[in-house]
Amino acid sequence: MSQGALSLAVLLGSVNAACSSGSSSAAGAAALVPAPATGNAPAQVWQARAGRRFTGRMVIAGETVYGAGLDRKVYAVDLASGRTRWSSRLGGLIGGGVLVAGDTVYAASSRPEGRLYALDARTGHRFWRTATGPVGAPLALVHGVLVAETQHGEILGVDPSSGKVRWRRKLGVARIAAAAADSGAFVVATVDSLYRVSSADGKVSRRAASPGSIVSDWVRQGPLLVAGTADSLIIAIAPADLRSRWRVALDAPVLDSPAAEGDTVFAASRRGTLYRITVTGDTAATAAPLAELDWPVTAPVTVEGGLILLGGADGVLRALGPDGGEAWRVQLRWPIELAPLPLADGLLAVGGNGDLHRYRR
């Protein structure tokens, strides 16, 4: 399931609307039972569970990983042990995960509450809370402004230190995070349009028709922004003028973010085909199948340590080599919807039931 599809599924769920503040907890204590693995898989250091399924972006800051669960809680988990340092319950579903800057964790709720929160990264206690309307897309911090996109089609610019709304604009429903551009601007992708927006006042300086339905976050490839579309395309645009620089067609919709490394982009179609896309300059690209898999890829593609990491609906995290051959695999809880997080000595893998797995190379 893609991030966009996950957000939609989360929004349609029916859950309790109660709200409670965070507190210290030993919940999610690490278990030393290794997950099943094959090939030359990295060694598992610990596995733990923090609440229920994580619903969006997770962030590692220092020795802590932060994430948001389907149970409306924001979690801080110790990287060394896997123990939950604190959890803080919000008043609504958290579809876009978390954003971390300095000593602050930002998260936003959708229905039934619709608020933006700033939490103390050390304790989970709330710094401030601001009414925004239901937020379904991941947050972005661009040029000193916190950008929130609501399910009512509004884009808000918020002061990250106080929570004060500086401006708001009605542009249309956006499913993915705003992407920073140059000259104090950012790019917003709505259902049918692309906008270049000023961070200072929210004014739109340029609009263009969207080259496709984009449901997963942009990745940077040199000066360009690259994304997959539900129309089976990988597209690249220039954030300065929003014009399409190149596009290639794959064999099925692309519902999760590709990965870029140098002049190469790796992308997986929903059918399960992994492609290598070679970019020539800023205006041309060619796509060639690298591996044809017999299972759907449901997580963003990640390139780490010379390997291509793919999470599947079957709960298996696979590592493929540059030739498309499988190097190793590990079994997590299904489905895997979030990309593994690279660490200096390994990686942190995220399963589909709130399970976290730290591996060391």
Image (tube, rainbow, N blue to C red):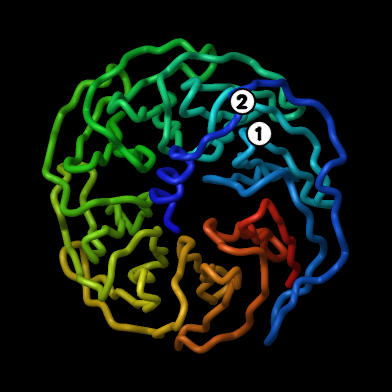
Residue 152: x and y in percent read 30, 26
Q: Is residue 301 above or below residue 43?
A: above
Residue drawn at x 59%, y 60% is 340
Q: Is residue 352 above or below residue 273?
A: above
Contact flag, marks 1 and 2 (Cβ < 8 Å)? yes
* Residue placed under numbered mark 2 in the picture: 90
User: Residue 190 occupies which quadrant of the picture?
Assistant: top left
Q: Quadrant of the N terminus?
A: bottom left
Q: What residue appears at the point 50 percent right and 20 percent down from the top-left corner? A: 113
Mark 1 is surrounded, within 10 Å at the Cα level, by few (under 14), some (14 to 19) or many (20 or more) other residues, namely many
x and y percentages locating residue 204 in the rendered image: 18, 26
Residue labelled with disc 1? 73
Kindly state the secondary structure of the residue where label 1 is placed: strand
- What residue is rendered at 11% in x and 44% in y? 209
Q: CA distance from mark 1 to mark 2?
A: 6 Å
> Quadrant where the C terminus lies?
bottom right
